[in-house]
Image (cartoon, grey):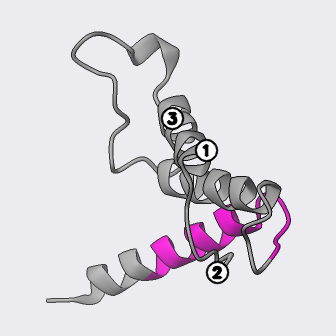
Amino acid sequence: YTKALRVPREACLDAAAAIAQDVPESALNPGNILPTPLSDSLYPATADATAQSLIRLGLAQRRCAPGEVAKRTRQLRAAVMARQASLP
């Protein structure tokens, strides 16, 4: 969405932080450190954190407001889920 040509380590760490924040503190234990891939908030939060990091680092060719990428990601996920539900 930002059309960045590269994703540096700092942006990857920001994405990792967003992923880690998706696991509720009460659910953390040695056998559960990753969020469920079915989480409604995981992908939008991770995409938005990555985009904002790239903007902050000056690597984004396209700037977007905080939350804009998350909103677009939620729309795309809803479209994919609707499409999958319509398949036989």
Which is more foreground, mark 1 or mark 3?
1
Is the Cβ of the residue at disc 3 closer than 8 Å to that at disc 2?
no
Q: In percent of the image, x 35 and y 86: which residue is there?
A: 83
- Magenta part, dominant SS: helix
Q: Label 1 neighbourhood size at 10 Å, few (<14), some (14-19), many (20+)?
A: few
Residue under pointer 3 = 22
- Foreground tag (3 vs 2): 2
Element under disc 1: helix
Q: Is residue 53 magenta?
A: no
- In the image, what residue occupies the spot 58% across and 59% down? 47
Image quarter for residue 30?
top left
Amino acid, disc 1: Glu
Which region shows up in magenta? 63-79
**The one of 52 and 70 positioned closer to us in this rendering:** 52
Residue that extends furthest to the left in the rendered view of this protein:
88
Query: How would you rate the neighbour count of disc 2 (Cα within 10 Å): few for under 14, some for 14-19, many for 20 or more?
Result: few
Eyeballing the image, is 22 above or below 83? above
- In the rendered view, would you say 81 is above or below 49? below
N-terminal-most mark, 1 or 3: 1
Q: Could you tell me which secondary element the residue under label 3 belongs to?
A: loop
Q: Disc 2 designates what residue?
A: 3
Q: Which residue is mark 1?
A: 10
Residue shown at 33% from the left, 49% from the top: 37
Q: Position of residue 79 (x, y in %)?
A: 47, 82
* Residue 16 image position (x, y, % from top left): 49, 39
How many callouts does the rendering have?
Answer: 3
Front residue of 75 and 32: 32
